[in-house]
Image (tube, rainbow, N blue to C red):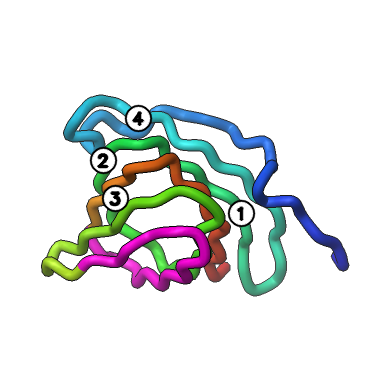
């Protein structure tokens, strides 16, 4: 599997989030899995401008485009902009506040 992907222009499959996750109205996020290895999965995710909540899985991600922030249930915040590398722990309760459509590459353990 020696290959490269163009994550910035990858075709994504869009689905509506659960209305319970969208305090300001339903949002559709896009996702595409780029690679699956014996130890991790790699993909692209896109969130439109707006706000949504989630309970995270273990994940490392890199923001490709867009802006916003992740607010954790304990009040900490992670600013998001192109080049941001984020690390999320499984079980973290988050609110994603996206001011400009956000696209990120994510890596999760298998």
Q: Quadrant of the C terminus?
A: bottom right
Cα gap from disc 2 to disc 4, whole angstroms: 8 Å
Q: First in sequence, mark 4 or 3: give its number.
A: 4
Cα gap from disc 2 to disc 1, whole angstroms: 21 Å
Report the number of discs.
4
Q: Is residue 48 magenta?
A: no
Q: What secondary structure is marked by label 4?
A: loop
Q: First in sequence, mark 2 or 1: give its number.
A: 1
- The image quarter in which residue 37 lies: bottom right
Is the residue under label 1 in contact with that under label 2 (CB below 8 Å)?
Answer: no
Can you give x and y, in whole percent of width and height, for residue 2 in the image? 87, 67
Q: Quadrant of the N terminus?
A: bottom right
Q: Which residue is mark 3?
A: 96
Q: Residue furthest left?
A: 74
Q: Is residue 1 left or right of residue 95?
A: right
Q: Which residue is mark 1?
A: 43
Q: Residues within 10 Å of mark 4 (few under 14, many from 20)?
A: many
Please name which of the two marks, 3 or 1, marks the residue nearer to the observer.
3
Q: Which residue is mark 4?
A: 27
Can you give x and y, in whole percent of width and height, for residue 53 in the image? 25, 46
Is the residue under label 3 in contact with that under label 2 (CB below 8 Å)?
Answer: yes
Q: Which residue is mark 2?
A: 51
Q: First in sequence, mark 1 or 4: give its number.
A: 4
Can you give x and y, in whole percent of width and height, for residue 9 in the image? 69, 42
Residue segment shown in magenta = 77-93
């Amino acid at each position: 599997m020696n290959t490269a992907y163009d994550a910035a222009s990858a075709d994504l499959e869009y689905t509506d989030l659960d209305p319970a996750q969208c305090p300001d109205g339903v949002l559709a996020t896009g996702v595409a899995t780029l690679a699956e290895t014996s130890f991790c999965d790699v993909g692209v995710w896109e969130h439109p401008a707006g706000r949504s909540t989630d309970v995270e899985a273990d994940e490392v991600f890199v923001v490709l485009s867009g802006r916003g922030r992740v607010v954790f249930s304990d009040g900490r915040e992670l600013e998001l902009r192109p080049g941001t590398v984020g690390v999320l722990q499984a079980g973290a309760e988050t609110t994603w506040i996206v001011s400009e459509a956000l696209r990120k590459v994510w890596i999760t353990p298998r």
